Image (cartoon, helix red, strand yellow):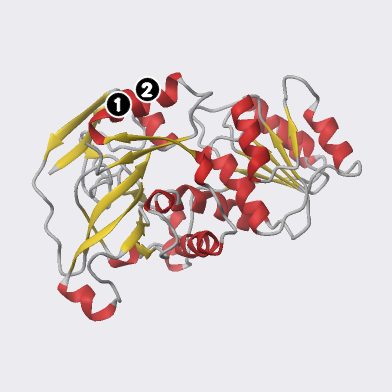
Amino acid sequence: MRALRYHGPKDLRLESLPEPQCGPMQVKIKPAFVGICGTDLHEYHTQSFVPKHGAPHLLTNETAPVTLGHELSGTIVEVGSEVAHSYDFKLRDRVAVFPLLYCRTCLSCMDGFPACCVKKGFLGLSGGGGGLSDFLCVGPEAIFKLADNISMELGALVEPLAVAWHAVSESGIKAGQASMVCGTGPIGLGVIQCLKAMGAGEIIAVEVAARRQALAKQFGATHILDPTQVDVAKVARALTGGRGPPVAFECAGVPSSLECAIRAVGARGTIMNVSIWEKPIPFNPNSLVLDEKKLIGSLCYRSSDFGDVIDALREGRLRPEPMITGKIALHRVVEDGFEALIQEKQKHIKIMVDLSAA
């Protein structure tokens, strides 16, 4: 079968591998669409999450090369003999795949927070297969059925939307409250949609790029602020009766964005850091202490977040179709996917790999 394999930074190879065999407690998936994630782009430049030679991943015991692709939808083509007795999975079921790998035995896992697992990893990054291949075998807990009115393309957006849904859920924001979203890439746009779906009030989006500003407005942002043109914190306070929004989401991963979010939120407000940072940044904790503000990290999701996103898609409370700005074939992933996202940032939000495309 075909598989796009990560060998190292800027070394992605489309290779031929043996088709994986479905174990008795596994489900075999034929991927349909796979999104290219910001984490994939980070790995394209600097190997951080993909395990290096000599340091195999604690759960998969694999090192590079690994098959990429963790934002995926697909079709069930085989159900393991033991799975069939306990789960209602059928051949040709359309599904989204929950890619988080976790040990189930550490304290975080037993407390119900697998994203904090001491051994955590992800399909498509840590080994165990990936969506950018013709077939993938996963455990039954990773399978989420898609409603009939959810397309396969939208099914591949469940994973990044679940990241956003989890961040909004963990922020403690209440219906009708104002919020601010700094950075409107795929996750920031997802946060805006989830805020709207959960009944948030005013949504202030902070963004420089015109295309992303327009999408933020389309998805529900009530105010768009360009940080190169206005004092964001001052305007945000004015828009919220002088208090500042009670919650801000940092989704850009640049120091000025985090500083902006901290300055803008009101006293005792919450800043949700959703970005993954490439390197340490200067930070003065007094910016939190003096007004008793809270800075909280949000990594990915729980299983319930996947289910909530699928319900919201089915009910039409999430309509993320405009996030998809390109569809490409597997053999063009480097040129039309990774390089396009790097070189044409103004044009693209989410590029989908169509595994059926010639």
What is the spatial separation of the Cα atoms under label 2 and label 1, in whole angstroms? 6 Å
Mark 2: secondary structure: helix
Residue 16 image offset from top left, x and y in percent: 11, 38
Residue located at (25% from left, 39% from top): 357
| Quarter location, residue 47 | top left
Q: Quadrant of the N terminus?
A: top left
Mark 1: secondary structure: helix
Residue 342 image offset from top left, x and y in percent: 43, 22
In the rendered view, would you say 331 is above or below 309?
above
| Quarter location, residue 326 | top left
Q: What residue type is labelled 1?
A: Val
Residue 51 image offset from top left, x and y in percent: 28, 38
In the image, which disc is placed on residue 46?
none
| Quarter location, residue 132 | top left
Residue 215 image offset from top left, x and y in percent: 61, 37
In the rendered view, would you say 330 is above or below 227?
below
Residue located at (55% from left, 51% from top): 319
In the image, which disc is placed on residue 334?
1
Q: Which of 65 and 330 is in front in this view?
A: 330
**Viewer can see residue 277:** yes
Q: Nearer the viewer, residue 226 or 273?
A: 226
Residue located at (20% from left, 35% from top): 65
Q: Mark 2 points at which residue?
A: 339
